Amino acid sequence: MSREHQWDEERLARRRAVEALRSGVPNADAVVALGSGQGDIEDRFTRLLGDLGGPRNASGARPGRASMLLGAGFGEGKSHLLTHLGQLATSAGFVVSTVVISKETPLHDPAKVLRAAMESAVAPDGARDVVAEAAAALDPDSPGYAELLRWLRGPGRDMNERFDATLLLHQRLSGDAPGADEEFLDSIVRFWSGDPLRMPDLRRQLKAVGEARSFTFSPVKARDLARQRLRFLPRLLRAGGHIGWVVLFDEVELIGRYSLLQRGRSYAELARWLDGTDGDEGEPLIAVAAITDDFETAVLSGKNDRESLPGRLRDKQTEEYAEMAALADVGMRHIERDLLRLVPPDQAELDRAYLTLRQLHGGAYGWEPPDVPGLEQLGATRMRQYVRAWINEWDLVRLDPGYRPLTDVVELPGNYQELDGLDDDSTDK
């Protein structure tokens, strides 16, 4: 690569970082430039990575699922911090997925959350087909594969038989095995990733290897199968050579705009992600969720969820809703008690960020940015507001060196009004 081309690439990276910071949507370049500014949370997360990737304890067990729940106001750096934590995780050998809760990816729908997690998953080497790569790396003689089988036939025996059957067939049909069916092997990987699997094809393949009578295949609901995939995948990824799986959830506060029933389901799913499943010790997964720090006041108290929602769910008088009520109660308690609040930037952090951004803007546009006033440094001013003000003022001065910018801040209140179109009960079918 020529020095001129390398210089162009560096300038392009700086411009990407500036534009991401201007829009308030952090990208890798921007996060690398600024760092996290949240040393305590970063240290805690790094310890979780180390624990999950560490050796077995004296009893032979591995550390299991861990979680963190982060809280801050809008524009105070939650997405930026999640991106930084994801970079730390990939550097430590983890597969990382980022799930942004939205109307298209509601937290209460495990199948849609699984799809988003698979679409965003990235391996430490940058590869995107993480399940296919892990499946290709499976070695039936390896300790990781033996650990996967022990779990599936022990603590994971409540999993649907499709997982045991597909793992068996993947072993029998992979590599140089006689009669290997590459198309069916691909369908197994797609099934593990969230796609349906044709039962006639599965039965035919089992019959071909003499295992047709070993499985009966009980029916399973789509949402339950999705939850089971989410238990299976971390162990599959570890058996395929990765340390584990980190799933980052952003904009979890959107659940405050769901209907009452969907909020109940969402709190229950949050509890599942943060706590895992009883008996699933050693699960190599870390879940990190970010939510606005006014959620408790605006939704748990403001919409009376904390007091009324569990009872409303139990009024359905079914075992499923009774379980959902108990889990929803746990999820709400997590929000009340376990929120790790981001620390507002102090003077030293603001000075460091200002100097970093000034250098970044200069490198992006080939000039020497002068000092700009930015915003008055008040405790209520958010980092995103400081950053946008500095960048916009440098833009204006670059175009008109005689201009003297002055930036005002207009606060927009949070919106927890219910969204239309989220009352689809298809997840109950």
Image: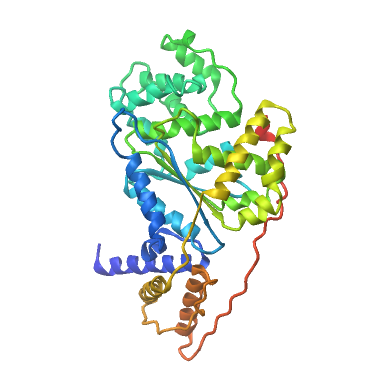
Q: Quadrant of residue 268?
A: top right
Q: Is residue 310 above or below residue 163?
A: below
Of 419 and 283, the residue lying toward us: 283
Q: Can residue 108 be seen in this snapshot? A: no
Q: How many marks?
A: 0
How far across and how far down the image is residue 145, in percent?
33, 26
How far across and how far down the image is residue 210, in percent?
42, 8
Q: Can residue 402 be seen in this snapshot? A: yes
In percent of the image, x 70 and y 36: which residue is there?
313
In percent of the image, x 49 and y 42: which residue is there?
117
Left/right placement of residue 320 relative to residue 143 reads right
In percent of the image, x 32 and y 35: which residue is there?
241
The C terminus is located in which quarter? top right
The N terminus is located in which quarter? bottom left
Of 201 and 213, the residue lying toward us: 213
Left/right placement of residue 89 relative to residue 254 reads left
Q: Is residue 330 above or below residue 219?
A: below
In percent of the image, x 38 and y 62: which residue is there?
35
How far across and how far down the image is residue 29, in percent?
39, 62
How far across and how far down the image is residue 326, in percent?
62, 35
Q: Residue furthest bottom?
A: 402
